[in-house]
Image (cartoon, rainbow, N blue to C red):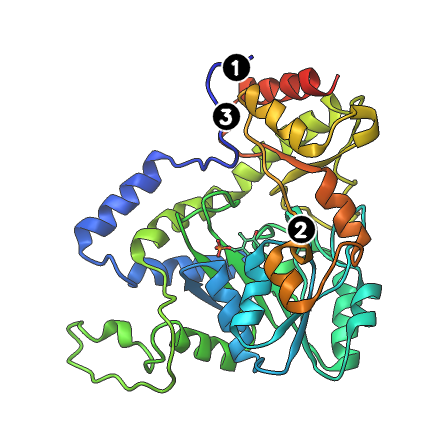
Amino acid sequence: MRDKFLVFGSPLIEKDEIKEVDAALRSGWIGTGPKVAKFEQMFREYIGSQYSIALSSCTAALHLSMIVAGIGHGDEVITTPLTFCATANAIIHAGAKPVFADVVRDTMNIDPNEIEKKITTKTKAIIPVHFAGRPCNMQAILELAKKYRLKVISDCAHAIETEYQNQKVGQLGDIATFSFYVTKNLVTGEGGMITTDNREYADKIKMYALHGMDKDAWKRYSDEGFKHYKVIFPGFKYNMTDLQAALGIHQLQKLERRYKRRQAIWDTYNYKLKDLPLQSPAPIQKNNRHALHLYTVLLDLQAVGADRDSVLNALIRENIGTGIHYIALHLHPYYRNTYHYKYGDFPNAEYISERTISLPLSAKLTDKDVEDVISAVKTVLL
Ligand SMILES: *Cc1c(COP(=O)(O)O)cnc(C)c1O
């Protein structure tokens, strides 16, 4: 057994990132400034979108997306129950109701057939979440959106590198939102991004993220002459800082290299865990690219003879930290009590909820760490 606890999702921070943060501190621009502008430009070039706005989190990005898409009281937004609570909470904060549609068991992504069953006259948008980094069935989702005139806000928190039919998933739909939280594929401590090709959305998001003040208010103390700002909308405080962007600029340059490292770990897991009582992630479809954010397996509970939480705790005793993605949202007290969801509503999401466990998958892992994870899983399951 390894002697030091392996923290799940620990980020890899290297010297050049630290140097850039140091430079930002010394420059005096520690708020939103030139590094944010540079990071935004690099990010939209990577995704291939027209516009990009850096924000304080993906949660903020989802919230602003709802607002600029005109979603509010009385509206419904369809999303997956197998996601982080922020996806549903953003809908609620905009005044609308989150309506869940069940997932496909293999891909763990929202099922377009289930989406169509949930569409009503109140439905305004769909939020597909590319679970673990695997693209949703975007063709079907975009067709539904067209047919019923719905907006598509793509929650790409797991999916920076994800491609759907050879296209970055962040280019698809009306708006895409990204997370740079500590466990994600690109980290800025806390941080998020919106990409879109819609100029009006981009302008509004930029303004709403900074109190609703008119354009370039962040330059108001520069040497270009004093400018009065005007408040156009009661906005939010959702801007990214140069300290965060300093990390992002370097993280983005290393994204593909780190992807390759995760790919190697992913392949090792697939190979070494294949005879155990668990189901590894489904194969990746041709012309699609999985961002390899989470390596989630489904335990064969009957063969293991224990529930998932016992396995998780046994792994902790082996000094291996894991993650649970996710306990389906409709089973949490708030959504249950408020929207009267109950056990049995989304059988596939529930099936996954009860069996899922995410093994460490980070470019920071050494070969020894990966071996430790595999031997701990074997010890616990065999
Ligand atoms: C992490 C995550 C979020 C929230 O991201 P933050 O940047 O922490 O706000 C939203 N949706 C999904 C699917 C996530 O995994």
Q: CA distance from mark 3 to mark 1?
A: 9 Å
- Labelled pair 1, 2 in contact (Cβ < 8 Å): no
Q: Nearer the viewer, mark 2 or mark 3?
A: 3
Split into 4 quadrants, where in the image is the C terminus? Answer: top right
Mark 2, secondary structure of its residue: helix
In the rendered structure, the answer to whether residue 19 lies left or right of residue 11 reads left
Pinpoint residue 145: horizontal percent, then vertical percent. 74, 75
Location of residue 315 with respect to 344 vertically, above or below: above
In the rendered structure, the answer to whether residue 199 lies left or right of residue 276 reads left
Residue identified by numbered label 3: 6
Q: CA distance from mark 2 to mark 3?
A: 23 Å
- The amino acid type of the residue labelled 2 equals Phe
Location of residue 254 with respect to 304 vertically, above or below: below
- The amino acid type of the residue labelled 1 equals Arg
Q: Tag 3: Cα neighbours inside 10 Å, few (<14), some, or many (≥20)? A: some
Q: Nearer the viewer, mark 1 or mark 2?
A: 1
Residue identified by numbered label 1: 2
Pinpoint residue 98: horizontal percent, then vertical percent. 65, 69
Residue identified by numbered label 2: 131
Nearer to the camera, 65 or 261:
65
Mark 1, secondary structure of its residue: loop
